[in-house]
Amino acid sequence: MLRVGLFGFGRIGRVHAANVVAHRQATLASVYETDPAGRDRAVDLYGVRACESVDELLGDDSIDAVIIASPTPTHVELLTASVRAGKATLCEKPIDLDISKVDACRAAIAEYEVPVMIGFHRRFDPSLAAIDRAVRAGEIGDVECLRITARDPAPAPVEYIAVSGGQVRDMTIHDFDLVRWLVDSEPSELIAMGANLFEQGYAELGDTDTVHLLIRTEAGAIATIENSRRGTYGYDQRLEIFGSEGALLMDNQYEVSLERHGAAGTKRRGTVLPGFIERYSDAYVQEIDHFVTSIVDGRTPKVSFEDGRKALLMADAALESMERNAIVAVPG
């Protein structure tokens, strides 16, 4: 059994905790959470040891691996300390909002042969994983275009936006990773356009509520990303990948799949799933399974520190593009 320590018992921390507890090869041993209510909830739910400090958790030799689900500003420090303590580490995205801090972390952990995985959970979604397998099997030939639509069901609170890193570094970063993964080619240049269409509070923070991007990869393929912080009908997650011999499409998932026929007409399907936890619940389960089994079996997890770094480089390029209103090269 892999003994796991958890940093953070907020919304995503609770998701990871439940999936570790349910895993056949893992046990949730310890939690470090600064909020007393969250800490007490973890103890009540799972009977775990509540650590009083980071050092207490990392100093426990019985802990094999850690999950970092605490706020973004804590990630670099916790990731560095966890690797130095010899703990296999799953860190939520982004690694940090500042690429210089990410690069400093990269240098600090380079000498340690400790597995590090970054939490791009969408790579473990069954539908997206099926698309990846089909692309790599050559079903659509050479990839030429990728189109991603991602819209949150409702704007996040301004208080969250103030600390999250903004739309591009917090939301679009998932789509940047999908581009690199599914096209299997590094981005070479991009142009981004952002707008404030409905959330004035975001504008006051220097953030956007709507972003569109056009990305060219080194292989010549073109990807488009459309993001909005408001989809009044639910959590909108669609994707189309087009190649020389065909196309693959991922539609939204629904609470029920049902067609209703009557005198008033036909209503197809049902209501789009309300949020990311519902839409990607299977992905989060598979993500933890991959992390745990990779460590147990001695395999390298497939979503690396470098994947997190490169997604942030794309985010920085997008912000530069919006500021300059120009096509920007994406650094390697």
Image (spheres, rainbow, N blue to C red):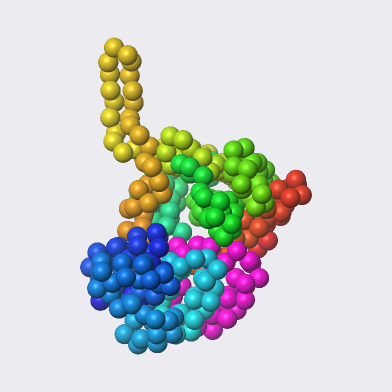
- Does 223 sit left or right of 330 as displayed? left
- Which image quadrant is residue 288 in? bottom left
Q: Residue furthest top?
A: 263
Residue at 34% over, 60% down: 15
Quadrant placement of the N terminus: bottom left
Q: Is residue 153 magenta?
A: no
Q: Is residue 113 magenta?
A: yes
Q: Across the whole image, how many numbered discs are drawn on residues?
A: 0
Quadrant placement of the C terminus: bottom right
Magenta segment boundaries in residue numbering: 92-119
- Which image quadrant is residue 114 in? bottom left
99 w.r.t. 271: above or below: below
Q: Residue furthest front?
A: 36
What x and y, as percent, mark residue 289? 32, 64
- Does 174 sit left or right of 13 as displayed? right
What x and y, as percent, mark residue 172? 55, 51
What x and y, as percent, mark residue 270? 33, 31
